[in-house]
Image: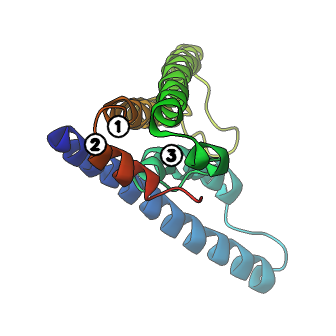
Amino acid sequence: MKTATKIANMLSRILAWCSLTAVTVTMFLVVADVAVRLIGGGKGVYGAYEIVECFFCVIIYGGFAFCQTRQGHMHVTMVLYKLPRIPCFLIWGFASLISAAMGVVLTIACWQQGMTVMSQGIYSPLIHVPKYPFQFFAGVSMIFFSLMLLLDGIKAIMALFNEEHAKEIRSHWVG
């Protein structure tokens, strides 16, 4: 389980670096757009809005898996924290596994959307950036997010039988 977690953390870091790069480029692009509008009398950087729109896909979806590995998503655990170990981790594990299943459904939807966008040749209207790579990136990100949720579900099931796993999981909860 530790090896799987290490691999998952490494892969989520790659996605996080993609997101960080997209945030940095977006920041510079928006600053340049505003500066050009102020200096140039109302005309900004050509296609800035479309580029930012595409990078938001990278920023948001790329952050999902990384945030899950850092236990950064909000969970309502105040009630679970007060339950005994068995019902607590049955609920937590079931919720994680259901979330992972929903992540798989979203992954399939992202890939289908990407295939549709690619087959129809949909590009951004102004600068003609193809939209499908960003749809596929969302799909890849959702795969990793689903894997993180699956790992969390497996850890929760292991916590049913192992107090050490239970303590590690509960260390991230607010009680």
Instruction: Tell me which numbered mark, 1 or 3, is placed earlier along the sequence.
Output: 3
* Foreground of the two, 167 or 118: 167
Please provide percent x and percent y for residue 83: 57, 41
Residue lying at the far front in this picture: please name it: 84
* Foreground of the two, 140 or 71: 71
What is the three-letter code of the residue carrying label 3? Phe
Question: Which residue bears the numbered disc 3?
Answer: 64
* Foreground of the two, 108 or 67: 67
Identify the element where label 3 is drawn: helix
Question: Which residue bears the numbered disc 2?
Answer: 8
54 with respect to 90 (left or right) = right
User: Compared with residue 27, is residue 90 higher up or lower down, i.e. above or below?
Assistant: above
Please provide percent x and percent y for residue 94: 51, 24
State the residue at coordinates (53%, 53%): 59
Question: Which residue bears the numbered disc 1?
Answer: 159
Q: In which quarter of the image is the N terminus?
A: top left
> Which numbered disc covers residue 24?
none
Residue lying at the far bottom in this picture: please name it: 39
What is the three-letter code of the residue carrying label 2? Ala
What is the three-letter code of the residue carrying label 1? Ala
Identify the element where label 2 is drawn: helix
Q: In front of the other: label 1 or label 2? A: 1
* Foreground of the two, 35 or 152: 152
Q: In which quarter of the image is the C terminus?
A: bottom right
